[in-house]
Image (tube, rainbow, N blue to C red):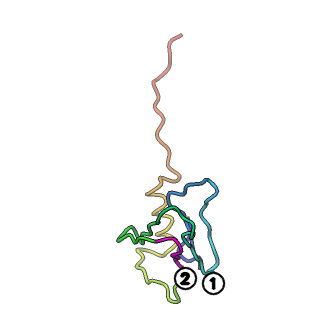
């Protein structure tokens, strides 16, 4: 998770076929190039925001870089409060289940 005001690219492999693929946080000036190997046994698929997947043939590449202008967003309070509240509500951070108490046991 990265705060929305951090200027950078969060590169997260989805369904990797190896445990060596991990999310990366890269500086805003980096350009990422992902290429389907020429000797690939088949094609690959790319999906952007979960919509309209595109077929990639061996040798095809995707080039990703940070946009010059950020996408404006609306905040209920401010970006930090909204970010922390969404983590708290979505991931239940800092919440504990109430422990049940059966009462004293007879011995």
Relative to 6, 54 lies left or right:
left
Q: In terms of secondary structure, where does tag 1 sit?
A: loop
Residue at figure coordinates x 54%, y 80% from the top left: 63
Residue at figure coordinates x 46%, y 39% from the top left: 98
Residue with the most extreme left position: 52
- According to the image, label 2 marks what residue? 66
The percent coordinates of residue 60 (x first, y second) are 51, 76
Which label was assigned to residue 107?
none
Relative to 29, 104 lies left or right:
left
Front one among 34 and 58 = 58
Q: Quadrant of the N terminus?
A: bottom right
Front one among 50 and 4 = 50
Q: CA distance from mark 2 to mark 1?
A: 7 Å
Q: Residues within 10 Å of mark 2 (few under 14, many from 20)?
A: some
Please tell me which of labels 2 and 1 falls first in the chain.
1
Residue range in magenta is 57-64
- Residue 62 lies within the magenta run: yes
Front one among 107 and 54 = 54
Residue at figure coordinates x 47%, y 63% from the top left: 85
Q: Quadrant of the C terminus?
A: top right
The percent coordinates of residue 78 (x first, y second) are 48, 76
Residue with the most extreme top position: 107
Q: Residues within 10 Å of mark 1 (few under 14, many from 20)?
A: few
Which label was assigned to residue 29?
1
Front one among 98 and 73 = 73
Marks 2 and 1 close (CB-CB < 8 Å) = yes
In which quarter of the view is residue 25 placed? bottom right
Residue at figure coordinates x 41%, y 70% from the top left: 55
In which quarter of the view is residue 90 placed? bottom left
């Amino acid at each position: 998770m990265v705060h929305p005001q951090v200027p950078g690219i969060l590169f997260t492999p989805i369904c990797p076929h190896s445990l060596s693929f991990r999310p990366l946080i890269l500086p805003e000036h980096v350009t990422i190039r992902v290429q389907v190997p020429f000797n690939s046994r088949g094609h690959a698929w790319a999906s952007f925001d979960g919509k309209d997947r595109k077929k990639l043939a061996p040798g095809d590449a995707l080039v990703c870089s940070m946009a010059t202008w950020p996408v404006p967003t609306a905040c209920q309070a401010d970006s930090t409060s909204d970010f922390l509240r969404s983590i708290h509500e979505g991931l239940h951070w800092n919440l504990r289940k109430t422990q049940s108490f059966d009462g004293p046991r007879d011995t």
